[in-house]
Amino acid sequence: MNINIYLDGPPLLSNTSKNDSFNKPLLPKSNMHITCLTIGSRGDVQPYIALCKELQTEGHRCRIASHSEYQPWVEDHGIEFRSIGGDPGELMKLCVDNGFLSYSFVKDGSKFFYTWFDELLATAWEACQGTDLLIESPSAMVGVHMAEKLEIPYFRSMPFPWTRTTRFPHPFAVQNYTSGRLLYNDMTYVMIDIALWAGTSKAINRFRRKKLGLPHTTREKLELWGVPHIYSFSPSVVAMPPDWADFIHCTGYWFLDNPNTSWKPSTELLQFLGNTSPSTQQKDEEKKPIVYIGFGSIIVPDPNAMSIVIVEAVKQANVRAIVCKGWSSRRNDNDNQQGQQEDDDKIATAILQGHPDILSLDSVPHDWLFPQIQGVVHHGGAGTTAAGLRAGLPTVIKPFFGDQRFWGQRIEELGVGICIPKLTTDKLTEALIEITHNLVTISKAKALGATIQEENGLKKAVECIYRDIHLAKRGKE
Ligand SMILES: O=c1ccn([C@@H]2O[C@H](COP(=O)(O)OP(=O)(O)O[C@H]3O[C@H](CO)[C@@H](O)[C@H](O)[C@H]3O)[C@@H](O)[C@H]2O)c(=O)[nH]1
Ligand SMILES: CC(C)[C@@H](C)/C=C/[C@@H](C)[C@H]1CC[C@H]2C3=CC=C4C[C@@H](O)CC[C@]4(C)[C@H]3CC[C@]12C
């Protein structure tokens, strides 16, 4: 396919064939103003903070456009912020309660999505004003039209693959994957693309006509534009599929160290880790392994039941655990359920705190904690998976929705951990014993950690932006 042929703009997904007319990184003539547009939870924003900081050290000015609750955090890192409305808690609840892109997801999602989507289009348009380059997560779905109107370069980026390949299915459509399902893998990308376009095309075309003064577009027309992608995962965790065009990059992870600049470890945490006073430290051979257990931004339906499973498994596996119960403290249903949820929170905390080998916290910077412990159990968020693997830790993943099962399979295939689709006491106990005692898993995880530490995803991402910026700009010709 000739990438110079396109009609009304870039594609939702692209599988344009190789183009080798550009190989050298090109430096931009002057400093740019760059906007990153993203929706979702912490893991959808944090990599952009890291990228913006890197770009700012290069002399560019950066802005993040996302939900308003991230404003103080983003600004604290010296990055401009614009709000695009929407509530990440609501999105998260929709995903966990219904499973991804299921019938009930579409039914429940439509209720709030259609009002919010018009607001997203309007606020995203405002947020892109005065910028020279737009980088967008495909989940935000609107930036491509803004870039077309503004005639500015447009990149897509994501912490997990979202570009057509026969190598693996779209991470939202992972089944009990066996290799050789080339057609299924390829089709999943097309199906998701079709579903998202079906849900958004009416509002998008209305917005294009009324606000942007652009012609009507279709999924087919959009597919003709080869949008450069910069994926922020490690090629040692997901190898670059050979059927990706050479403007689809996989840069290595975008780590943000010291994410909460004012955070300090509590004495309780230091004591639990045994690194306060040397006299109180146990002898090495008496030490029980310490694991981290946390489910990130996931809003768990029954936090009390989950806490009981965790306490039992920690006891039976004879480990110590730092449990981050961020999952129960973030729910935001309607008012009459609020009291019940606060009670649930207290019960969940009490269950966890009743055991001397468990320390319960709301959250803790993984970049600080992980190098000091022996294993991790989490939901398989792309960023949390990255943090555990960088520290060389064997990993247990309990996936809830979206790309998490994909990461669960990857860590199993790499031999660095276990994926447990259902969290039961027996399964978790078994998995905890495995990750803290199986020497093969432990050494494979260590070796992968060393490889990831050698990578510099941020530097690579900046190089890719410079290299492909001329391809990313596709105004009307
Ligand atoms: O107590 C905490 C919690 C998180 N983190 C860090 O915060 C980031 C969170 O990233 P991630 O696991 O990707 O984010 P979540 O928001 O929990 O996950 C959502 O976003 C991800 C990126 O789109 C998806 O992969 C997941 O499926 C989705 O649930 C990572 O760097 C973690 O190391 C901490 O340092 N301390
Ligand atoms: C018919 C409607 C309901 C269809 C078109 C709309 C679906 C929306 C609600 C879906 C499409 C893609 C989804 C989406 C993609 C990726 C992520 C990253 C994850 O970390 C948090 C959830 C988040 C942000 C979800 C939220 C819900 C989204 C935005």
Image (spheres, rainbow, N blue to C red):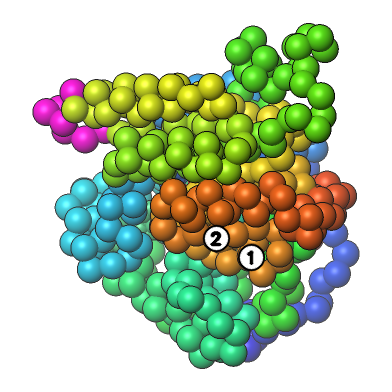
**Image side of residue 316 versus residue 167, left or right:** left
Does 274 appear above or below 456?
Answer: above
Residue to which mark 1 is pinned: 412
Does 206 appear above or below 340?
Answer: below
The x, y position of residue 258, in whole percent, is: 69, 26
* Residue 210 forms part of the magenta stretch: no
Which quadrant of the figure shows ligand 2? Answer: bottom left
The x, y position of residue 183, in whole percent, is: 51, 90
Q: Residue at (11%, 28%) from the top-left corner?
A: 336
Report the amino acid beneath label 1: Glu
| Separation of marks 2 and 1 at Cα, in angstroms | 7 Å
The x, y position of residue 223, in whole percent, is: 49, 77
Q: Quadrant of residue 230?
A: bottom right
Residue to which mark 2 is pinned: 419
Report the amino acid beneath label 2: Cys
Are the residues tagged 2 and 1 within 8 Å (C-beta)? yes
The x, y position of residue 41, in whole percent, is: 45, 42
Q: Is mark 2 within 8 Å of ligand 1?
A: no
Q: Quadrant of residue 277?
A: top right
| The residue stretch that appears in magenta | 332-339
**Image side of residue 281 versus residue 78, left or right:** right
Q: What element carries label 2?
A: strand
Counting the numbered discs, the total is: 2
Q: What element carries label 1?
A: helix
